[in-house]
Image (cartoon, grey):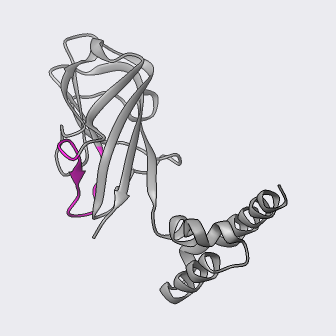
Amino acid sequence: MKSLILSILALTSLAIFVAPVHAASQADMDAMEFSVNHGNVGSFAKWQMGTKLLKEKEVTQKCVYDFSVQGGAVGTLSLLDEVGKPCVLPKSAIIRDVLIDVVTAPTSGGSATIALGSGAATNDFKTATLYSSFSGLMAGIPVGSAATAIKLAADEDPSISIATAALTAGKLNVQIRYQLSE
């Protein structure tokens, strides 16, 4: 029990220490990784906790389409991040899963179709689908397998493509899970 409590305390203090790593140099990052892997908490060394925390990064990024912010004209729009700027997926990201959370069902005065894409393509997250089919939680094309994964060759802005007719309402939270490669 004492070991577990020490591990939790060490993780908590590590989380505070590691939080600003975006400003650290590669040498600093390597030193932090070594320090955590070889620290005095045995389970950290056993599990290589420094490597897991600092190098094996799996990211879930939420990108949003919101009619009330972006409108719904026919065309292609960037999905937005939490602060309203275009989402950016990094070069060498291997996109493993895409989940679409339909917060507000899209509506249209016509037969609008919606496609979602990584930015490298306009429909590699979800092919053009009639707006009325969007409800609840929906799977995208990448569904956790190598056969459906997408590797980006450059930084990309995920997008929504609206075709055939304009949308008159709708909000989609697109959850994109990826890992960085080389």
Question: Which residue of the protein is positioned furthest toward the right in this rendering?
Answer: 2
Residue in the picture at 45% in, 19% down: 104
Left of 98 or right of it: where is 59?
Answer: right
Image-quadrant location for residue 63: top left
Q: Is 48 or 28 nearer to us in this picture? A: 48
- Give coordinates of residue 82: x percent, y percent: 52, 46
Q: Is 47 or 22 nearer to us in this picture? A: 47
- Give coordinates of residue 145: x percent, y percent: 25, 42
- Give coordinates of residue 164: x percent, y percent: 14, 21
Is 154 one of the magenta-colored residues?
A: yes
Residue in the picture at 63% in, 82% down: 35
Question: Does residue 34 lie above or below 47 as drawn?
Answer: below
Residue in the picture at 25% in, 47% down: 118
Question: Does residue 17 lie above or below 178 as drawn?
Answer: below
Is 109 one of the magenta-colored residues?
A: no
Residue in the picture at 59% in, 68% down: 46
Name the image quarter holding the C terminus.
Answer: bottom left
Is residue 157 visible to us here? no
> Magenta-highlighted stretch: main secondary structure?
loop
- Give coordinates of residue 40: x percent, y percent: 73, 78
Q: Is 77 or 142 nearer to us in this picture? A: 142
Q: Which residues are magenta?
A: 146-158
Question: Does residue 48 lie above or below 30 as drawn?
Answer: above
